[in-house]
Amino acid sequence: MNVLLINTSDINGGAARATYRLHQGLRHIGVNSQMLVQEKITNDKTVLAPEIRLFQGIARAKLTFEALPLKLYPKRTNGSFSVQWLPDTVGSKVVRIAPDIIHLHWIRAGFMQIETVTKLKQPLVWTLHDMGDFTGGCHVAGECDRYKVSCGACPQLNSANEWDLSRWVWERKVKAWKNLNLTLVSPSSWLAQCARSSSLFQNFRIEVIPHGLDTQKYQPINQHFAREALNLPQDKKLIVFGAIEATSDRNKGFYLLQPALQELSKSGWKDDLEVVIFGASQPENPPDLGFKTNYLGHLHDDISLATVYSAADVMLVPSLQESFGQTASESLACGTPVVAFNSTGLKDIVDHQQNGYLAKPYEVEDFAKGITWVLENEERLQKLSFYARKKAEQEFTVELQARRYSALFQEILMINKSSSIAPFLDFNNKLVL
């Protein structure tokens, strides 16, 4: 079975890291997996990308042109929005690779035009990494549910026009994707339900397979050693927060974290706690979080991330919407409990008061209460840590993820094979030549 995973990058971004982990997992269990990307960072020979620097430069330049239609909406919000209108060469590359099954992932940022998906003749599996595949362009819909109908009058574009850019993108998707041989996979129950309620994907098969990770890389490291390696204090409780664009991406919830920590600092923890932030460098004028804050900058490799999680006593994930929440699953694998809001994909990862705390959605007082609940009792903290690691070992290993996908691929190929033979069978299911 030859499988081709298609993603914009191999390891740049959360979706890319999730895809590359799956690729490695599939190869580990004996599946002939390759990745096709626009941006290649690793030296992995099984990851295919433009080799000539000119082509790589053109790919980067496409990002500028991809965003041109958004210039029509100068008052739009800063949320990510993909139009996918530029032509591409993905179809011809797939023909040369000739896989048995194609596994789509995050294919935006000028990599694949909406209409290109229709040209792929092999059976398609498509893993959702955010809401952008079933909306009119936005990656995170927030409180808007217009994707259930037809988009238009998009709040992210700050548009009151029913026939705006989001409706145009949605119409193109409807026209191109209505007859696809497609199976969708969501990493969480929440995102799967959103997809099932969408006008674009409501009639497709949707499965739930959580993202996996290497639990040999993400495992508990001696806390004293981890703190020493990162030059962090040994005599404090440490709370960690981090993500790509941790402090600038509104969806990651830093604006909710700040008042929650300020609330916490008033409750007797002022001299006993320090904050650790990764995914952002220290700004010139750091915000007041109520505690001394250690900024670690951007971390890209698994060992560094596992060291940070292991150094901490609790991981904070105050996101508004997460399709899954890989920082949460990574933290659990390192034996570090997680405090998050009881919403979206994080509900599949954190079990309330078993391996962390799920606060009432977007209530900063309860989020602060959750941090206290995790830290105030040392025996409880040790139990939470034990069950955090156990949850990761039972549900989030990359081998388990790869085997689930492999079984799905084989089932789909068998169904397609049966469908192709069916017209040549008589009423007794005998082959008619």
Image: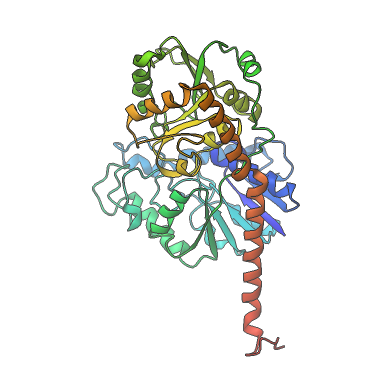
Look at the image and tell me in which quarter the N terminus lies: bottom right
Residue 280 pos. (x, y %): 49, 22
Residue at the front extreme, as displayed: 379
* Residue in view at x 38 percent, y 13 percent: 268
Residue 249 pos. (x, y %): 42, 31
Which sits in the foreground, 336 or 382? 382
* Residue in view at x 63 percent, y 13 percent: 228
* Residue in view at x 39 percent, y 17 percent: 289
**Residue 275 located left or right of residue 392:** left
Look at the image and tell me in which quarter the C terminus lies: bottom right
Q: Is residue 180 above or below residue 75?
A: below
Residue 225 pos. (x, y %): 66, 17
Which sits in the foreground, 163 or 183? 183
Residue 20 in sight: no
Q: Quadrant of residue 421?
A: bottom right
Q: Quadrant of residue 77?
A: top left
**Residue 156 located left or right of residue 279:** left
Visual colour scheme: rainbow
**Residue 431 located left or right of residue 127:** right
* Residue in view at x 42 percent, y 41 percent: 67
Q: Is residue 98 above or below residue 188?
A: below
